Amino acid sequence: MNKTCRIVNLQEEYSQLFQESLAHLEDGAPSKMNALRTKAFEVFNEKGIPSNKVEAYKYTNLQPYFKGTLDIALTNEAAFNDTVTQFNCDVPELDTHNVFLVNGWYSHQNDVSGLPKGVIVGSLRDMAAQHPDIFDKYYGETAPADEDPMAAMNTAFAQGGAFVYIPKGVVVDKPIQLVNIMNGDSDRLVFQRNLVVVEENAQVKMMMCDHTISPQKFVINNLTEVFANENSVFDVYNVQNQHNLTTQVSGIYVHQKKHSNILTNNLTLHSGITRNNVAVTMDDEQCESHVYGLYLSDKNQHVDNFTFIDHAKPHCQSFELFKGVLDDSASGAFTGKVLVQPDAQQTNAYQSNNNLLLTENAKINSKPQLEIYADDVKCSHGATVGQLDDEAMFYLRARGINEDEGRILLMFAFAYEVIEKIRVEPLKENIRQLVEKRFRGEFDKCDSCVVCGQQGTSVSCL
């Protein structure tokens, strides 16, 4: 079932939408998911869709993008079509377990039979019913639904998504790839909720490929909760390749236990309006986190990365690096906060944000922050904003490299520091090629899944 609504008065009409849709939202959904809905919506209704008057959303006013006539999929009908057949990930070097989601719903065409014994990958709703002990223990435990209005909105309207569980001691040798496909013949509002649990001594790498294959407007609220238990290793690479009529709010919230090692890397290669929320809580000793991001924007695109790293316990390390290249009239923002709590002695925390502006009209707002309440720590933060180095360009020109090629070389050298953090070699090479194409202006159509390299329906980027 789809519901079409005309959103003009944001609070009043989203309130009406929630009340009218509540029976459909609750029908067949897990009891814990339903138990959190009403409280989450009360938080959302109080705070509303954030504008730039809200400090945490100071650089991104989301209100204009959540208005308009939008279809909302209240059932999983969207996942029961032939959309997935347009994708067939066949890059030889990139061997993954492929999982497809269509408009936020887990596709019935997925085949995950090749996963190691004990690993569970499936529909969030179905797996919650089959494994309530896991779902009830973790769902909603790290998403800030009581603080962030977009996390509250997702919690209130959540229905579909992916459930990933890696049991104790299991090492998944091939990455699990979630391909998030947006498709339809009308403008859509999409809610997706993912839950990832990595148990003790387990290891897994995940990729999330966000992709649009039809030219309609998409407004997406996507939230992923991750629990990295003791001695676990978890990587997630979120590759965003969407056309200019897409507005996406993407949240990744990670909770770490003792000796866990996590890496997140948001790679925004093409988008319309993008807000990435990344939060990591190191809730035990000897945790290590790596939080990276690369954003490439042109025309009137906008990318806002908002990160929060919470050093709650001693002897932990965090490494954070975000880089942006902005062209034309593109805009961007980076707000990163590292909190070192009083008990978090012997903390090492490093944060950096570097930006390259290619035109006078491109702009960036950067706000790195450290908040330290312990005295035995090593912490640093910084930000840079600049243009291409004239001396470096002169050096290249003097050696016979033309100006256009020189610009591409300098931009790629700037971006590569984030690309090299990718711990999956075939993905690293694939992203390297795609970034180079982006700089060469060859990324003119959003017609391939950037992770898979798979050809799909050609959609012009407006």
Image: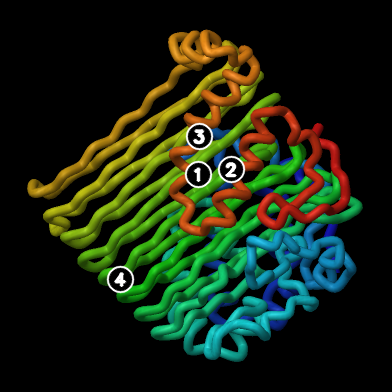
Label 1 sits on residue? 419
Which type of secondary structure does the marked residue at label 1 adopt? helix
Marks 1 and 4 sit apart, C-alpha to C-alpha, by: 27 Å
Q: Position of residue 241 (x, y in %)?
A: 69, 46
Which type of secondary structure does the marked residue at label 2 adopt? helix
Name the mark on residue 432.
2
Q: Earlier in the sequence, mark 1 or mark 4?
A: 4
Label 4 sits on residue? 257
Q: Earlier in the sequence, mark 3 or mark 2?
A: 3
Q: Residue furthest front?
A: 399
* Tag 2–tag 4 contact (CB < 8 Å): no
Residue 142 horizontal side relative to residue 94, left or right: left
Marks 1 and 3 sit apart, C-alpha to C-alpha, by: 7 Å
Quadrant where the N terminus is found in the figure: bottom right
- Towards the viewer: 235 or 248: 235
Which type of secondary structure does the marked residue at label 4 adopt? loop
Dot in front, 1 or 4: 1
Which type of secondary structure does the marked residue at label 3 adopt? helix
Residue found 27% across the figure and 63% down from its top:
287
Name the mark on residue 415.
3
